[in-house]
Amino acid sequence: MNPSLEFLLIFIISLELSIKNNLYINLIVIAFALVYLVIRRISSKKLFALIAIPFIPAFTIFATLFWFNGKSDPYNAWSLATRVYVYTLTIACLAHDTTSSQFARSLEQNFHLPSKFTYGVLAALNIIPQMASAVKQIRVAGMMRGMYLSFWSPMLYFKAILVALNSADNLAQGMESHGYTEGQKRSVIEVVPMTKKDWLIFALLLALFNLGIFIL
Amino acid sequence: MVKNQSIKVKELTFAYQDEQPIINKLNLELDTGKFSLLIGPTGCGKSTLMKILAGLYPKYAGKLLAGSIDLAGLKTAMMFQNSGQQFTMATPREEIVFALENLGLDAANYQERLKLATDFTQIDNLLDQNISTMSGGEKQRVALAVLVAMDIDILILDEPFASCDPHARSFLIQKLAHLRDQGKTIIISDHVFDNYDSVCDHVYAFEAGNVKQLSLAEMEQLFKAVDYDYHFALPEDQAAAFVLDQVQISQRRLLLKQDQLKIVKGKVTLITGANGIGKSSFFKALTQLIPYEGSISYEGQEVRKAKSRTYLKDVGQIFQAATDQFLTVTVKDELELSLKNNPNVTMDEVDQLLVKLDLFNHKDQVVYSLSGGQKKKLQILLMLLSSQKVLLIDEPLSGLDHESVKQVVSLMKACQEKYQQTILVISHQLGELATWCDYHLLFDQQRLSYLER
């Protein structure tokens, strides 16, 4: 499915579910997302992380409403806790299908997001792995000069910010040197298709979902 | 194609912030369709001029105080000194798509240009690899590929071969000459003059904020190969600093598979090898930045098990990118930090060294605003002051002019003799540096082996 449409679908579902308090539809969406992820061959490690990590906020919400509310409210406790999984698992479907650059390019082409925003964010995302290794390297550089920087040392992050500022400046110049000019019309070489089939699936899923909300 | 035109720079004066102009009333006429080489000491303003020609300055830094530039209506694009920071996208293919979309090209043209650029720079195997995982030399090759794909009239290249192995270097220079023959204008800056002899049309030398064109005789003198007399021995039963046993290092692919190897203690060992072969990764394994299989022991202790805090006080590294080494803001702060660990050296002695390295007047400057070569010299000085027992040096000479190379090598030499350090040095530039090295390790086919000379 087209990444932008998939995102829009997930966004509408999440939005509707955050207004409508409905445990059963939450469970159906979760089940659907899980089945989808398994069909799309997500690795078991990733799936485990997707279930384990949201458990912390989900459990917190559940505990608050179930045990620490003046009057125990099991339905709301379950409903709000499962909502955490609705958000994480639906967006995981999108993340599993699409790379950041496909998603960004789709938003640019299909939803006409300004290119400045698209490529600015993409470039920043591409810097993240570099920043992670930079932090590691800064620590090593520090130890080599007798300066131990722990993970909570402000010095470490001060230096990391300097590195980031420096790369941000180089990046802006780099984009320009590769022909990018703000506001200039760009062509499309690798088209992100948005087909009738995409729209059909989108409309069908959205209709089914809303029907579900209405009935349940 | 446009010929007999020229790029004219008239009375150009440019300064960063409120400092003295770095370029002062510069007049320059560069013929289009020619291969021009810019030379001059580090920090003389070569990169600044190139960024002005590429239209990046004064937009991004500095002030144009006077003068004009006429590019004869041609398009310019530039390859930066630090080419790794020039990419917006994750892979070379995506970057080329990005650049060509910026130029408004369609899919048919893209296929053609992509093929042209990848064949030209031979990066087929790198096209879909993440750029952040590439070696310094590979990034430089990819940066050139993007410019070729963009089909730019004037290619401005700032020390494009600083991290290239000799083979890649001569290959790329020949390719650039080929582009020149097709009518492109090549403007290149470099400190190493090998391989230019038969291809370079003009040489321009920077002197005190201005530029002078070299005569043919001067060019001949410049390109004349200097013979250095150096020898490498084979290690015998000397004490070892590092002992490798059945070691494997992998980064996405297997880089090193070494049964036995000994690095001699208290001596200088040179490591050479092609781009991307794994030289820097070998250093990373020695500094605990990446894992390895098998055993690497340092003075009898397994490297992976050593406590970082104490181990890295013994084993230091001079990184390929100078800015990775800096921890504070100004030159002075950095020096004071290094002196803290070395009470044997006084600030007066450091001042003398700064004078030797032409850095004394930059003491209060922010380290990031130094020129490429100045950063490199400062970085080397900082690590020499830390006086580790072992120093791993990754391409210490990239970005340094001939004079600076001499200064730096003599400084490293003096330091090594004084502290009897074990030194491993990666370099593509032999010459001056090789005269200092005792042993030579060649990194080839996933193995390190000693060579005699």
Image (spheres, coloured by chain):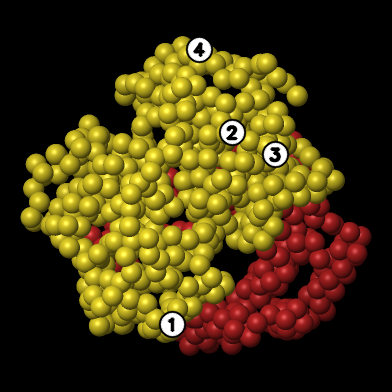
Chain colours: A red, B yellow
Indicate the amino acid at tag 2: Val
In this rendering, position of residue B336 left or right of residue B1: left
Indicate the amino acid at tag 4: Lys
Query: Circle 4 sits in a helix, a strand or a loop, which is it?
Result: strand
Query: Circle 3 sits in a helix, a strand or a loop, which is it?
Result: helix
* Residue B307 visible in rendering: no
Find disc 2 in the rendering and name its residue: B199
Residue nearest the observer in this picture, A18 or B437: B437
In percent of width and height, residue A52 lies at 55, 83
- Residue placed at 55% from the left, 39% from the top? B79
In percent of width and height, residue B132 lies at 54, 58
Are dots 2 and 4 on a single chain?
A: yes
| Quarter of the figure with the N terminus of chain B | top right
Are dots 2 and 1 on a single chain?
A: yes
Find disc 1 in the rendering and name its residue: B259
Find disc 3 in the rendering and name its residue: B150
Are dots 3 and 2 on a single chain?
A: yes
In this rendering, position of residue B293 left or right of residue B187: left
In this rendering, position of residue A67 left or right of residue B368: right
Between discs 2 and 1, the one toward the N terminus: 2
Between discs 3 and 4, the one toward the N terminus: 4
Q: Is residue A109 above or below residue B444?
A: above
The span from disc 3 to disc 2 (Cα, nearest Å) is 23 Å
Query: Circle 2 sits in a helix, a strand or a loop, which is it?
Result: loop
Mark 1 belongs to which subunit?
A: B
Are dots 1 and 4 on a single chain?
A: yes
Between discs 1 and 3, the one toward the N terminus: 3
Find disc 4 in the rendering and name its residue: B10
